[in-house]
Image (tube, rainbow, N blue to C red):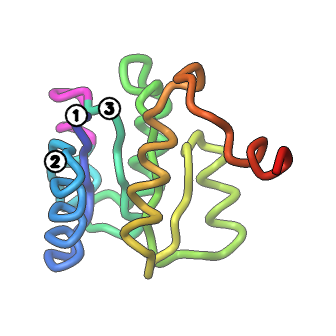
Amino acid sequence: MADILVAEDDPLMLRMIEFKLKQHGFLVRKATNGEEALNLARAEKPALILLDGMMPIMDGFETLRRLKESPDLRAIPVVMLTLKGSEQDIVYSLNLGAADYIVKPFHPGELIARIRKILTPPSSGREDPLRRSQIA
């Protein structure tokens, strides 16, 4: 299964996310600040990065900006996972290149579904649920 880098400075939140991801078969790499996340991303090239917005040393927004400026890292999808839920923060992150934005608190099942949606290629042959509801 896919390798996911989780950048989160809250130890309890980090353990919960790690547990849920591993429960669904993902390999988890962990960072507790933006600088560490950037270094791990360069070294490991994960399939996806979950990035907290508020972390020490370098916050998630600056980390996202640097990831998307880096030619060898910009293609890695980044999901912001943060308490900061203002429209300004969401729009800023999406404009920087975030694949998705989830505001804490969140439902673990929703997080897994969003990750799978991002990591599943569009040509997977899976039926579109919207199309199915239109047919019924």
Q: Is residue 39 magenta?
A: yes
Point out the frontmost of discs 1 and 2.
1
Q: Position of 76 compared to 87: left or right? A: left
| Type of amino acid under label 1 | Met
Q: Tell me which numbered mark, 3 or 2, is placed earlier along the sequence.
A: 2
Q: Are marks 3 and 2 in contact (CB under 8 Å)?
A: no
Image coords of residue 120 (percent x, y): 47, 32
Q: Secondary structure at mark 2?
A: strand
Rounded to the nearest angstrom, the CA distance separating label 1 from label 2 is 10 Å
Residue in the foreground of this view, choosing between 53 and 23: 23
Q: Give the residue pinned by disc 3.
A: 47
Residue bounds of the magenta highlight:
38-45
Image coords of residue 98 (percent x, y): 55, 45
Point out the frontmost of discs 1 and 3.
1
Q: Give the residue pinned by disc 2.
A: 28
The residue carrying pointer 3 sits among few (fewer than 14), some (14 to 19) or many (20 or more) residues within 10 Å by Cα, namely some
Q: Are marks 1 and 3 in contact (CB under 8 Å)?
A: no
Q: Give the residue pinned by disc 1.
A: 1
Determine the image quadrant of residue 104.
bottom left
Image coords of residue 101 (percent x, y): 55, 59
Q: Residue at x 21, y 44 (%)?
A: 26
